[in-house]
Image (cartoon, rainbow, N blue to C red):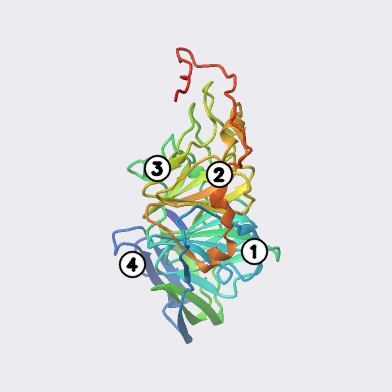
Amino acid sequence: MISYQRFGDVPAKRHTQLWRDGRLLTEEVIGLDGFDGPASTLYHLHQPMQLRRLGGWRPLPREEWVPEAHIHHHFAGQTLAPGGDALSGRRLLAFNDDVEVWLARPDRVMSGWYRNGEADELLFVHEGCGTIESVLGDIDYRDGDYVVLPRGITYRVVPDGPTPQRHLVVVSSGLIEVPSRYRNGYGQLLEHAPFCQRDLRGPSTLRTIDQEGEFEVTLRIRGGLQDYVVPHHPCDVVGWDGYLAPWALNIADLEPLTKQIHPPPPVHQTFEGRGFTVCTFLPRPLDWHPQAVPIPYSHANLNSEELIYYVAGSFGSRRGIDVASLTLHPSGLTHGPQPGLAEGSLGTTHTEEVAVMVDTFHPLRLTSFARELDQPDYAWSWTPPIELEPASEPAVPRAAGASAAPTPTG
């Protein structure tokens, strides 16, 4: 999304000579859609194709769980134990042909380097800070950061210390982009967008490392992982320019949109991918119409599925949901506020909720890891206990010209 960038030494013209210390540098073009999509051009001290050893290919773990019933789910993500690094510690929760959702609680530096050769990645940092080191430069990350990692970028995640972190990782078979309705024909963010170019952070430091040795690079390709050992440090780039690069956006820099009457979730959209969107719910003023119900109305997603990761605060339409929990509201089923919450929301003027939602347009398939976290009572949380008495209509002012609600009959 960040437009043209240039770092370090590059020649005046593409595909021309660049020398350093008496050697001709190796030019590498990384790009999408043949030569028609976003691309960057890198200048290496060494040929990036060199190998020292070749490891094996192994399939990614994807043991599917098919629940006995089609119901809503609550996953206790906060129970995931720390372990592994930002790659080895990932656990796959849900997936389809368009998108995968992983959780991780890394507590160490990645031992090698990683490149996703078949998908874009969106890393949401719930808890933790550190640096993402890439061949295009370093990006520091902190709590609340989204980091977009385009396919083809070699990187590793270096936490600041041993304290376990919490990551939510969205892996997309297509591009992860800023929604097209936020951009003009030149790619510039429009005035109504909930963030602007000044909020986006690209690589801040390009470190050129000329070091021989054995460096492990893991490539994700064809649904699995292939290990390579290369003879030179991957970060041997002296300069690059182009449009394809990692970038970050912190949720504290988002400007949530509000309306007089409760708006649907798409007003909170942050990213779009092929077959899914990502929305961010943030602290904000709530609906101000005198008869507003400032809480999501019941709705049925007839051809989409709603996976929500709860980051902070209290989510007004849910009970029993803790920080780092996830809920899945699948297609074909109605969901909305649990009993009593709509009435309890009346008169509320602000919300402190923070959550990330992945809304998919094709059904999600669950994994055995999801089964480990599943809380089966959630599907019954809309069924009131027998002793629950009906709420009385509150005395709230009506909007000018509005008529009183009709008295129920029958």
Residue type at the position of mark 2? Thr
Instruction: Please tell me whether mark 4 sits on a helix, a strand or a loop.
Output: loop
Residue at position x 49%, y 32% in the image: 262
Residue to which mark 2 is pinned:
383
Q: Residue furthest front?
A: 410
Amino acid type at mark 3 = Gln
Residue hosting label 3: 188
Q: Secondary structure at mark 2?
A: loop
| Residue topped by disc 4 | 15
Mark 4 vs 1, N-terminal side: 4
As drawn, the residue found furthest toward the bottom would be 53
Whether residue 331 is situated above or below residue 288 in the rendered picture:
below
Q: Please name which of the two marks, 2 or 3, marks the residue nearer to the observer.
A: 2
Task: Say which element carries label 1.
Answer: strand
319 relative position to 16: left or right: right
Give the position of the C terminus as an image quadrant: top left
Judged by depth in the image, the label closer to the viewer, 1 or 3, is 1
CB contact under 8 Å: marks 1 and 2: no
Res. 104 image quadrant: bottom right
Residue 191 lies left or right of residue 144; in this view the side is: left
* Residue at 36 percent of width and 63 percent of height: 31
What kind of residue is marked 1?
Pro
Q: CA distance from mark 2 to mark 3?
A: 48 Å
Q: Which residue is mark 1?
A: 159
Residue 278 x/y as whole percent: 46, 49
Q: Quadrant of residue 77?
A: bottom right
